[in-house]
Amino acid sequence: MPYLLRLLLLAGLCAAPASVRAADPPPEPADIIRTFEKAWAVPKGYMRPLDDAGWKARMTAFQKLAAVGDKAIPALTDALTKGELEVRVFAAQALGLMADPKAKPALEAALRDKTPAVRLYALDALSMFGKLTPTNELKAMGEKDPNRDVKAHVGFALDRDDKPDSVALRKRLAEYDLSKMNTAVAGKVAPDFELTDATGTTYKLSDFKGKKAVVLVFVYGDT
Amino acid sequence: MRDKIAEFEKRNVQLLAIDPHESHRVRRMLRDVGTKPDEVLYPVLADPVNAVSATYGVAFQMGIHTEWSNRPATFVIDKASVIRYEKRGINFSDRPKSSDILGEIDKLGEEK
């Protein structure tokens, strides 16, 4: 083996233990987004298969970006502006879950994205700064956007009846324990949760223990 | 619908619906179907970051209304908090009938 190569190998071997000893650095936001992009293969049709792993990649990336916090915003606006279709959709959705004023210009530009889902999530994200004002552009979008869901979301963004709390939303996502994903199994104890209904009443699953059986129905929005 | 709910109440069963959106969207959805939030027959819970959907293994699996939403799913949880029935839908209308769910509840054989 040539002397120089051996030297390089040795240098590599010597460097390895040092990097193991050092604490793992937090993941780079751009890497989190790239990892999502690789794992999220577009399925045929609108339904992902039951054994799909893509949804876990999506949830994992959202959680990790929320945990990174403010530093993730530039990578997300970059992905929203320059990414491929699925990455732009992902970035617009992520920016709604972790609203940050720095992302506003990119989100406003995304209202003109050619992909409906990007426009739709950009509307949701912009409404996280408060109910939107009905500008001419938004009014036109609400009337003429070729996608009827986008039109509906213009309405959601103009009519929202609350004061959005983006800090609480981001915190909730950042604190989500990813090891809980997909842990609801027949025969096992139901994973506990605490959620609030439309009137502000909070329900905790374990409060029903010993009192009542519970039927849990996951709806997807307007059913 | 009200009659079906009465069947669940008769069996001392709590119905909980989970919507993978913020609560303003839940209120909007209820308004759109003509129900006041304080008139709903069972709680519709907002799961704004899809955390519960992810825990129950249904998050971001169905592309519907131009969103990545959860797949429709139903779980029956007994009084001891053990999951006794799980159904994850394979299309948007693949959900058990209320009579099927009532059948599952009767199988639990729990005291009313």
Image (cartoon, coloured by chain):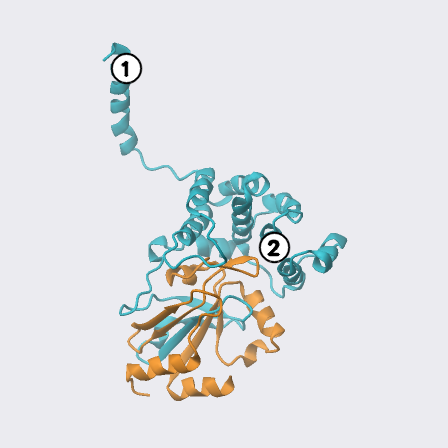
Chain colours: A cyan, B orange
Which residue appears at 69% of the width and 56% of the height? A145
Residue A153 on image: x %, y %: 63, 60
Residue A166 vertical placement versus B56 (above, below):
above
Q: Are tags 1 and 2 found on a single chain?
A: yes
For disc 1, the neighbor class at 10 Å (few under 14, some 14 to 19, many from 20) is few
Residue situated furthest top in the rendering = A3
Q: Element under label 1? A: helix
Residue A177 versus residue B8: which sits nearer the camera? B8
Observer able to see residue B58: yes
Indicate the amino acid at tag 1: Leu
Q: Residue at x 49, y 66 (%)?
A: B92
Residue B17 position, x and y percent, is 46, 72
Query: What label sits on residue A5 in the rendered view?
Result: 1
Classify mark 2: helix, strand or loop: helix
Q: Going 30% across and 33% down the picture, which residue do you hit? A: A22
**Quadrant showing the C terminus of chain A:** bottom right
At x 45%, y 70%, the residue is B94
Q: On the rendered structure, is B49 left or right of A192? A: right
Q: Pick the residue in front: B80 or A216.
A: A216
What's under tag 2, amino acid-wise? Leu
Can residue A212 be spotted in the picture? no
Q: Which residue is mark 2?
A: A120
Residue A107, image x, y percentages:
62, 47
Check the image and report above or below for A211 versus A120: below
Label 2 crowding class (10 Å Cα cut-off): few <14, some 14-19, many 20+?
Answer: many
* Chain under callout 2: A
* Quadrant of residue A120 within the rendered picture: bottom right
Q: Which mark is residue B51?
A: none
Residue extending furthest toward the left: A1
Quadrant in which residue A80 is drawn = top right
